[in-house]
Image (cartoon, rainbow, N blue to C red):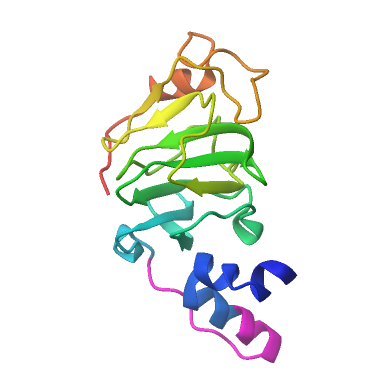
Amino acid sequence: MGNFVKSGLFHKFFGTAAVGAALAAVLGVAAAGPAAASTGQCAAGKYCQWVDQDYTGTFGSTGGDVPNFEGMNDRVTSFWNNTDHFVTLYVDAGYQGECVWVEPNGWSYNLPLRYNDQFSSVRQWKRGAGCGYVVTRAGAWVPTGGASGGAGGTTGPTPGEAGDPLNQMMNQTGAVQNP
């Protein structure tokens, strides 16, 4: 965590509760458990994410770019882009690998299997080149028609085609839950 904590990005991204928990762990003091997570935690102008579905579990938010989620790396299961601009999520640190655009107020209460516990970095105000999906303010995952992969291409099926595991899972899901 070193540089992430020292730079202030840790506090900015994970919030006061995580800083308090980290200090409690270092000082050997028991920390009180976090209140139930919800979209109410996500302030206007922030991209927010949770490690469990339905906006529960460990919570993180940011109003800026985060090149490496560190403690939440490959653990994101639900998110909400509570901003007035696009953000781009990447499966690899440093804004690399397959990517997904998220519209202003776009959300997903339970990430599809293809992306669950995969995201590692986020950029604000940027639509990454060649992202395979856009997540809408209605919670839909819509194929963009472009190749997935912010760094150029994908090795998986073309987004939106029958062999795409995201589509296979979405065809079996139930009700949409709006944040």
**Vertical relation: 65 (above or below) 89:** below
Q: Which residues are magenta?
A: 22-36
User: Where residue 101 appears, x then y in whole percent?
Assistant: 44, 34
Which one is in front, 10 or 127? Answer: 127
Q: Residue at x 42, y 57 (%)?
A: 56
Left or right of 90 in this view: 104: left
Q: Residue at x 27, y 49 (%)?
A: 179
Where is the N terminus found, in terms of image quarters?
bottom right
Residue 36: name its quadrant: bottom left
Residue 107 visible? The answer is yes
Query: Is 33 colored magenta in this rendering?
Result: yes
User: Where residue 65 appears, x then y in whole percent?
Assistant: 53, 54
User: Where residue 51 appears, x then y in whole percent?
Assistant: 51, 54
Which one is in front, 81 or 124? Answer: 124
Residue 172 visible? The answer is no
Q: Residue furthest right?
A: 2
User: Where residue 25 appears, x then y in whole percent?
Assistant: 66, 83
Q: Residue at x 26, y 35 (%)?
A: 138
**Vertical relation: 153 (above or below) 41:** above
Q: Residue at x 55, y 29 (%)?
A: 114
**Vertical relation: 161 (above or below) 89:** above
Which one is in front, 122 or 120? Answer: 122
Left or right of 125 in this view: 2: right
Residue 119: name its quadrant: top right
Left or right of 136 in this view: 48: right
